[in-house]
């Protein structure tokens, strides 16, 4: 556990640290010690101040290659979106202000990519239904599995119908950001919940609508795997459809309804995933902060052995 990590071409999300390291300097030095040359500013319950990173970058040579919108604020249970697609004009404007702030921070640290992660539908009844279905799915048995997956598919279809106007608002908001910050790459990533409006079909609508604005797709191996186990389009379907527009991927494993596991400790077929990922795509290791250095290092070797 005290051996230095072998230099690798992956990025490490700062979400992996949780509250263990309290400064960006400590996070950067820890990443370099594990062999990482690149960082992603990810979501965490305890965001750290970024002051002092410039000197650390000069000392270590590490770079920031991606930033998840929301990383400057404490993570919440439903942080799947930035409200860029909200039906409330005031919330949309607030989300645009937040997104601008994150993009400006990315520019300050020469980070080329900002990731917009999901956007939940705002109908209260659908939200309550999704929470109940998630609990039922977690406790499902062989006898109830088919009934629950049918209920999930029905819910997602209604979310898609109910969320069409929100998708339109999301597209307009992203168009505004692209016009204001044409030099920054923006990528959209599906959220983790059944009420996320960026489901399989809607992701295609958004990418097609903003094709001229060079909007990209960002994949999440853990979240998409859990969608597949719930009866929704799975890993291969997403990557087959959107792999040509993929800018990067969050590499995490998933099993038994739980994501953010270190690759190799769950059910994701990473050989299949590797077949769709180009050499140029950013590959970000993003695991729950309850997992430590040894598990992160083991997951890096696991991914290399499977073609990453």
Image (cartoon, rainbow, N blue to C red):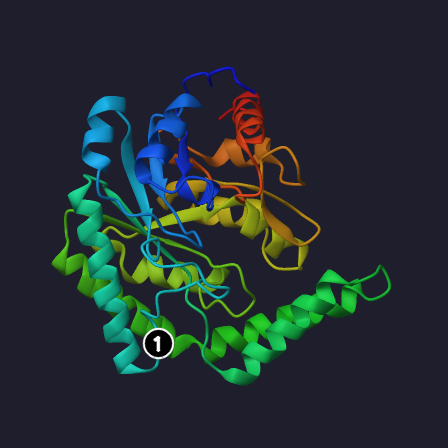
Image-based side of 76 in relation to 265, left or right = left
Q: Outermost residue toward the right?
A: 143
Q: Is residue 254 positioned above or below 170 on the image? A: above
- Residue 105 location in percent, x, y? 20, 49
Q: Is residue 248 positioned above or below 135 on the image? A: above
Which quarter of the rendering shows the N terminus? top right
Instruction: Count neighbours of disc 1 (C-alpha within 10 A) and say few if under 14, some if 14 to 19, many if 20 or more.
Output: many
Image-based side of 132 in relation to 263, left or right = right
- Residue 296 location in percent, x, y? 53, 30
Q: Residue at x 52, y 70 (%)?
A: 195
- Residue 109 location in percent, x, y? 20, 40
Rendered image quadrant of residue 96: bottom left
Image-based side of 67 in relation to 290, left or right = left
Is residue 21 or residue 276 the one in the foreground? 21
Rendered image quadrant of residue 272: top right
Q: Residue at x 62, y 36 (%)?
A: 269
Q: Which residue is mark 1?
A: 86
């Amino acid at each position: 556990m005290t051996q230095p990590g072998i230099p690798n071409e992956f990025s490490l999300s700062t979400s992996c640290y949780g509250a263990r390291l309290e400064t960006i300097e400590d996070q950067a030095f820890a990443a370099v010690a594990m062999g990482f040359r690149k960082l992603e500013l990810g979501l965490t319950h305890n965001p750290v101040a970024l002051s002092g990173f410039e000197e650390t970058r000069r000392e270590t040579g590490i770079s920031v290659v991606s930033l998840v919108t929301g990383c400057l604020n404490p993570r919440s249970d439903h942080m799947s979106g930035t409200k860029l697609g909200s039906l409330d004009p005031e919330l949309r404007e607030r989300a645009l202000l937040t997104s601008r702030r994150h993009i400006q921070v990315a520019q300050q640290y020469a980070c080329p990519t900002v990731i917009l992660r999901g956007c939940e539908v705002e109908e209260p009844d659908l939200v309550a239904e999704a929470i109940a279905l998630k609990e039922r799915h977690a406790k499902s048995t062989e006898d109830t599995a088919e009934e629950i997956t049918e209920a999930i598919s029905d819910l997602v279809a209604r979310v898609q119908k109910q969320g069409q106007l929100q998708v339109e608002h999301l597209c307009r908001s992203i168009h505004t950001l692209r016009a204001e910050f044409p030099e920054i790459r923006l990528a959209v990533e599906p959220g983790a919940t059944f009420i996320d409006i960026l489901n399989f079909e809607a992701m295609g609508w958004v990418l097609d609508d903003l094709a001229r604005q060079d909007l990209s797709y960002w994949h999440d191996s853990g979240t998409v795997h859990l969608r597949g186990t719930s009866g929704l389009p799975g890993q291969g379907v997403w990557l087959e459809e959107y792999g040509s527009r993929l800018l990067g991927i969050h590499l995490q494993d998933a099993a038994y309804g739980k994501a953010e596991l270190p690759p190799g400790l769950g059910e994701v077929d990473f050989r299949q995933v590797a077949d769709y990922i180009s050499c140029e795509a950013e590959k970000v290791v993003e695991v729950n902060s309850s997992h430590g250095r040894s598990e992160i290092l083991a997951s890096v070797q696991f991914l290399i052995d499977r073609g990453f």
